Image (tube, rainbow, N blue to C red):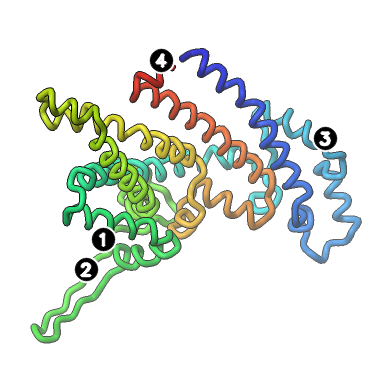
Amino acid sequence: MAAFVIRRLLWLPILLFFISAITFALGLYGPGDPVQVMLGVHASPDTIARLRHQYGFDQPFYVQYLNYIGNALHGNFGYSLVKYRDEPVGRLIASRLPVTIQLNLVAILMGVVIGIPLGLVAGLKRNTWIDLIVRAIVIAGISFPIIFLNPVLTFIFSRQHDIVLSALHLSFSIGPILPMVGGHWDGIFSTKIILPAFIEATGVIAVLTRQMRAGMIEELSKDYVRTARAKGLRERAVIVRHAMRNALIPIATILGLMLGGLVAGSFLVENWFGVPGVGALAYDALFSRDYYIIMAMVLLIAVAYVVSNLLVDLAYGFLDPRIRQS
């Protein structure tokens, strides 16, 4: 197992080299010009040329790339060129990354706590009314995009609703049940995190429920389950120790990819709720052509996905001894 981990880690520098080179080239020669964005459309050519020389954009590509990599190895990922003028990119990401990790971690935990039990029950109660309800929830969770859930759930849970019953001469108000986030972030234990995390968790719940249901149905139909039952094992032991454990192996892959997305954030959710995370930072960087921030974000996400895939492979070995031995 140690040799396998070492081999996977040796591929990390090669992967990061290609990702950084491609991202740097797209940022340097892609559509738009960050210097033009900084100075505006009415800037004189002399002013543009002087600023390009100041930032080294007039040097050959390989010189700029080697300078960037050399600085990055020392923890210097450049400075914001546009929105956060001259602010170190590393400091910007470091200040916002914990917020995004907290939000996405709560969303994944919601997905695991809700999705896996739902899928387990649906797989055990196949083709019953319980299974039909769970499948309807899965279809709704997959079909409704975040851009629809954001305003709808915000309207339901984060606004005050005045209810008037004219026949009974009654009127009363309900809500807001959950607060909006807004500027200040109060941490992972604040009620502000519930609504944005749940919106992100809807897709996670749907995917995990569907995969868990399909896995349980497949595992319960295999010969080893029938053999275990024929030997007189209790049904709970057959389900938990055998069928459920094997059904969780594909879930590990899905969760691994989701863990990689912990550092990516959600552009729509973070911007809609005013969450000061890296998703909102990347959104601003993309629209302002602040490409030092974009490059640092791409490298960070690449590292996160490589590490998460490595953890998935290790989890396979834990869940299935046959994989560990191979």
How far apart are labels 3 and 4 at the CA level? 45 Å
Q: Is residue 298 above or below residue 4?
A: below
Circles 3 and 2, Cβ within 8 Å, touching? The answer is no
In front: label 3 or label 2: 3
**Mark closer to the chain start, 2 or 4:** 2
| Nearer to us in this view, 130 or 52 | 130
Question: Pointer 2 and pointer 1: residues touching (CB < 8 Å)?
Answer: yes
Q: Are marks 3 and 4 in contact (CB under 8 Å)?
A: no
Labels 3, 4: front one: 4
Discs 4/1, front: 4
* Distance from the alpha carbon under mark 3 to that under mark 2: 62 Å
Tell me which numbered mark, 4 or 1, is placed earlier along the sequence: 1
Foreground mark, 2 or 4? 4
The residue identified by callout 4 is 325
> How much space separates mark 2 and mark 4, taking CA atoms?
58 Å
Give the class, few, some or many, for how many residues have Cα within 10 Å of label 2's Cα (few <14, many ≥20): few
Q: Is residue 189 visible?
A: no
- The residue to which callout 3 is attached is 62
Which of the 4 image quadrants contains residue 19? top right
